[in-house]
Image (cartoon, rainbow, N blue to C red):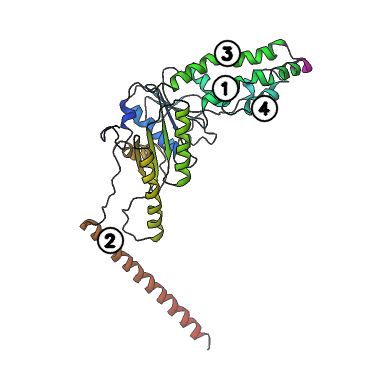
């Protein structure tokens, strides 16, 4: 069991681990993966010579987070000298596939296999950009994609050979050429997998929210990572409600009680993880300045502005109630004047 100092509620352990080359960020949809990975990349850029953040999300929210257009080529993020971003389309592009008559067949076979898209993207990036610190988001396990990809030879080898003869395609686009291309990727993918399974080089950050489905998906994700020997010791719990509002709300109180139930379960399940809690904000975190401003919650545990049961909290509640009373009296006066005007108009209509 690690000490309390080691298991601080921050991501400082990631920033301090100089050997890390790959930092994956994943979780259920809508939990804030893009925001969290963007902020992690900003924090890493402060302690690393060069950082590259890559998104394989088809929605490409990375451009929205930084409010800057990114493509499949590394682009320097505005306001930084060592932080680059790129958005990779994980689908297999037709122009990268050999032959005219075989394009559709090969594309359909390839895209039908879970994980092959990420495997191809990662292989291309590994060959091109060795010098960067890696920060990626990916929807499926690369190793599963590799196994499925290589099974093409056993499942479709004969079919591909027959199809090439049927279409009269040259030998360079035949079975041996197509499957040779996949075999050629194997060494690169194995290098990637070897690094993924090295905790000195790779770690996975799970992002979630304090709700049942997110807790369930996070546990499934952690179990899958353990199965494939990928290190994970950080959980970021986003959109946490804190009891710091002076306005009384039954809905808010009910949501906080529900969240607290699942927060307790997170801490019970992941007592040997670094758990970082982030507050729910009334606005989106978009743009470099907003991301920088919110980043302090990743390295310093968030503290509510007002603590319940203190004199400060009571004074704030009194002030809020006075303001609510003033607003209510003004609204009542407005309604009275409006009603009086309607009555006078109705009285005049009898003459």
The magenta stretch spans which residues?
Answer: 164-170
Give the crowd class for mark 4: few <14, some 14-19, many >=20 residues within 10 Å: few
Residue of label 3: 184
Give the crowd class for mark 1: few <14, some 14-19, many >=20 residues within 10 Å: some
Tell me what residue is drawn at x 67 percent, y 27 percent.
108
The picture places residue 138, in percent across and down from the top left corner, at 50, 30
Residue of label 4: 108
Residue of label 1: 147
Comes first in the chain, label 3 or label 4: 4
Residue of label 2: 317
Whole-angstrom CA distance, mark 1 to mark 2, is: 60 Å
Q: Is residue 17 above or below residue 176?
A: below
Comes first in the chain, label 3 or label 2: 3
* In the foreground, 18 or 200: 200
The reply to whether the magenta stretch includes residue 348 is no
* In the foreground, 49 or 79: 49
Comes first in the chain, label 2 or label 4: 4
Q: Secondary structure under badge 4?
A: helix
Please identify the quarter of the rendering in which residue 174 is found. top right
Whole-angstrom CA distance, mark 3 to mark 1, is: 14 Å
């Amino acid at each position: 069991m690690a000490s309390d100092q080691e298991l601080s509620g921050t991501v400082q352990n990631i920033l301090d681990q100089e050997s890390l080359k790959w930092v994956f960020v994943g979780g259920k949809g809508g939990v804030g993966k893009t925001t969290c990975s963007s902020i992690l990349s900003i924090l890493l850029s402060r302690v690393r010579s060069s950082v590259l953040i890559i998104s394989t999300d088809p929605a490409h929210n990375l451009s929205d987070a930084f409010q800057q257009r990114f493509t499949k080529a590394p682009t320097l993020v505005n306001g930084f000298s060592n932080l680059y971003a790129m958005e990779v389309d994980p689908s297999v592009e037709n122009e990268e596939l050999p032959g005219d008559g075989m394009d559709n067949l090969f594309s359909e076979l390839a895209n039908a296999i879970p994980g092959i898209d990420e495997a191809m993207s990662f292989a291309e990036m590994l060959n091109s950009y060795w010098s960067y610190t890696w920060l990626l988001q990916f929807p499926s396990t690369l190793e599963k994609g590799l196994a499925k990809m290589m099974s093409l030879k056993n499942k479709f080898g004969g079919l591909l050979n027959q199809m090439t003869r049927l279409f009269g395609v040259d030998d360079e686009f035949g079975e041996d050429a197509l499957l040779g291309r996949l075999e050629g990727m194997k060494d690169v993918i194995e290098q990637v997998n070897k690094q993924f399974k090295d905790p000195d080089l790779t770690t996975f950050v799970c992002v979630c929210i304090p709700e049942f489905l997110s807790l369930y998906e996070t546990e499934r994700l952690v179990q899958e990572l353990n199965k494939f020997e990928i290190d994970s010791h950080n959980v970021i719990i986003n959109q946490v409600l804190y009891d710091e509002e002076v306005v009384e709300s039954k809905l808010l109180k009910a949501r906080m009680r529900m969240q607290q139930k699942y927060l307790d379960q997170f801490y019970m399940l992941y007592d040997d993880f670094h758990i970082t809690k982030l507050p729910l904000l009334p606005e989106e975190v978009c743009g470099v300045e907003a991301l920088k401003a919110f980043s302090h919650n990743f390295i310093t545990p968030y503290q509510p502005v007002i603590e319940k049961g203190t004199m400060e909290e009571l004074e704030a509640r009194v002030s809020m109630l006075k303001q609510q009373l003033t607003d209510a009296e003004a609204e009542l006066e407005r309604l009275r004047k409006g009603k009086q005007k309607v009555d006078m108009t109705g009285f005049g209509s009898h003459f």
